[in-house]
Amino acid sequence: MKPHIAITTCQEQPIISSDDALFIKSLKTLSPNLAVTITPWDQKQINWSDFDLILPRACWDYHEKFTLFTDWLSHLQNINASIWNPTRLLKWNSHKFYLDELGKKGVKILPTLFSSQQNPYDIADGFDFYNTDQLVFKPAVSAGARNTWVLDKNNLKNHSALETHLKNNDFLIQPYSQHLVTHGEFSFIFFNEKLSHVIRKTPKKGDFRSQPKFGSLITEETNVSEAVHAQIIDILAHIPENWLYARVDGIIKNNVFQLVELELIEPCLFMDIPISPTHQIFAQAVLEKL
């Protein structure tokens, strides 16, 4: 029987990205007998035991169906499904308070206040704590900058929606990073614990968000110091489970890397950017897990 891989998308965007289209083409080139099924992760009537390997490549709505998503991961774990990255790691990475855990272990993260439902901060607290005029508020369970706010100290009126979110959800509160806006956010992309490529995402003028859908400039970065590379490797050493792919996002300032996020669930891997055949590298790494 030929091996069978499931690549999961989401109901809202069931079609694979151009990035993953290249990857799937490489999979089939390297393994012509391989069967590939593309399906939303929450598609009913799917027997996940039928697959030799499951890749949650585009579960982009997981944060909107969070309980359903974690239940799905628990089901995969209970049936001993082969999913990469592993279910326990996906659960750990799905709530951004993992950054607090990493920070306490010595990883240099962006300065962050962790506001929990049990112990929420007021909107104004971060301005005094960081002695700053602008703050960024990020939900701990979110993706793609959804429900992310930037507030100015001199304009704190009429933010009842954010106040409600802070009381009812876990949040990250961070000083606004002009360095990220000016110099960009770097994404270090690894397959099977080996660095594949590095991407710089520079927000468009007038925006602070680095995601491509907001018009950021995406370029390959080929000039990264050995010191920064070593810092990235140290961060990866703190991942609590084995992993297949990882994207390490952060800023570089004075040759020091500050972690913004560690993407282990459904990150864009920017395989269509570099000249080198990164989609083939990823495909080979996946086939090695069969």
Image (cartoon, rainbow, N blue to C red):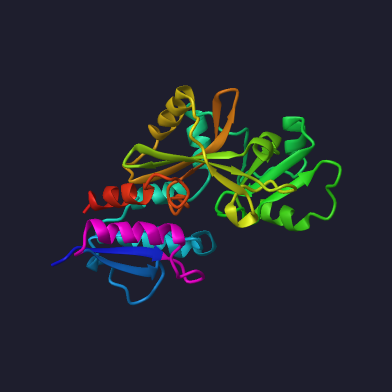
One can see residue 260 in this view: no
**In this rendering, would 287 be left or right of 11?**
left
Q: Residue furthest bottom?
A: 45
Q: Quadrant of the N terminus?
A: bottom left
In the rendered image, which quarter is residue 3 located in? bottom left
Q: Residue furthest left?
A: 1
What percent of the width, then of the height, locates residue 236?
40, 34
One can see residue 236 in this view: yes
Q: Please give the range of residues in magenta.
A: 9-33
What percent of the width, then of the height, locates residue 103?
52, 31
Residue situated in front as seen by the camera: 254 or 280: 280
Q: Residue furthest front?
A: 275
Quick check: 172 above or below 68? above
Q: Quadrant of the C terminus?
A: bottom left
Instruction: Tally the numbered discs.
Output: 0
What percent of the width, then of the height, locates residue 191?
35, 43
Task: Identify the residue at image location x=40%, y=33%.
Answer: 238
Is residue 20 shown in magenta?
A: yes
Residue situated in front as seen by the camera: 245 or 104: 245
**In this rendering, would 279 be left or right of 143?**
left
Is residue 11 shown in magenta?
A: yes
Residue situated in front as seen by the camera: 159 or 16: 16
